[in-house]
Amino acid sequence: MPARPGLSACIITLNEADRIGACLDSLAFCDEIVVVDSGSTDDTRARAVARGARVLDHPFAGYRAQKDFAVAQARHDWVLCLDADERVTPALQISMEAEREAGFAAAAGYRFARATEYFGAFLRHGNAYPDRVLRLFDRRRGGWRGDREIHEHVSVDGRVVTLAGELEHRAYRSLDDQLARYRRYATLMAADMHARGRRAKLLDLVTHPAWRFLRGFLLRGGYRDGWRGFLFACMEADYAREKFARLWLLQQGAGP
């Protein structure tokens, strides 16, 4: 029987006092919790410490870089990375613990579905679901690789297994919060695309939003989520439009 590996949970934060508690409570089965904070002005740090987390301060240089730093601070090689607005469900914990008892022998990393809560209900269709993410992995064989700081993801050298259970994603506090987040992401993505040599045409401001909406709402069944699915698809289309508008403006020398 393989030895039961230690497991470190890693979270990055900035002003997440209203959400960090539920996130950390869902990680109580881990051997340690590492929180890397980038200058919160609310009670995020104090609430994390109160739940037994090891809290470190580190200047924010990008989402990928911050998460990579957090993983490097962990005491164990097997790490579980979450955002402060995410929570491990009991079903997902059971799946993780079963693999852990077997020594994580089946894979170098594990992915699982993520369900996004949207105005009082979880989206179950469209571009939002199942949104499988690889967050549990052996840092000796993978991590937050690459140089893209936005829409970052984990990759590993070895087999990846999909676990049963879900990660709850309580992403948006309000519509204003969602719009502000999309605006921030659109700015970062446009700058990244421009730096990589990607160029936009004005027609992209029509075709990309239209495809994003049609793919999510119709082809992937977002309409089954009712008005929430429709609103989410509309917001995603707006995000695509702003991203390409900003890229086109960068090409014109008009700024992000």
Image (tube, rainbow, N blue to C red):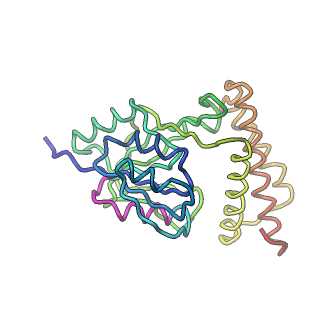
Quadrant housing the N terminus: top left
User: In the image, is 2 to the left or to the right of 59?
Assistant: left
Residue at the left extreme of this rendering: 1
Residues 231 and 198: in front is 231
Residue 9 or residue 24, whichever sits in front: 24
Span of residues in magenta: 65-78
Q: Nearer the viewer, residue 25 or 116?
A: 25
Residue 154 against residue 120 in the figure, above or below? below
Residue 248 at x, y = what percent? 81, 65
Query: In the picture provided, is 147 more to the left or to the right than 100?
Result: right
The part of the image, by quadrant, that contains residue 200 is bottom right
Task: Please give the name of the residue rendered at 74% of the width and 50% of the height, measured from the top-left corner.
Answer: 239
Residue drawn at 69 percent across, 36 percent down: 216
- Please determine whether, in this image, residue 120 is positioned above or below residue 82: above
- Exactly how many numbered labels are in the figure? 0
Q: Quadrant of the C terminus?
A: bottom right
Name the residue at 79% across, 63% down: 246
The residue under the point 59% across, 30% down is 122
Residue 121 is drawn in which quadrant?
top right
Residue 187 % position (x, y): 72, 62
In this picture, residue 59 sits left or right of residue 204:
left
| Quadrant position of residue 165 | top left
**Prevailing secondary structure class for the magenta stretch in the rendered image:** helix
Residue 223 falls left or right of residue 44: right
x, y percent for residue 253: 83, 75
Assess whether residue 195 is covered by the magenta stretch.
no
Q: Residue furthest bottom?
A: 253
**Is residue 66 on the magenta stretch?**
yes
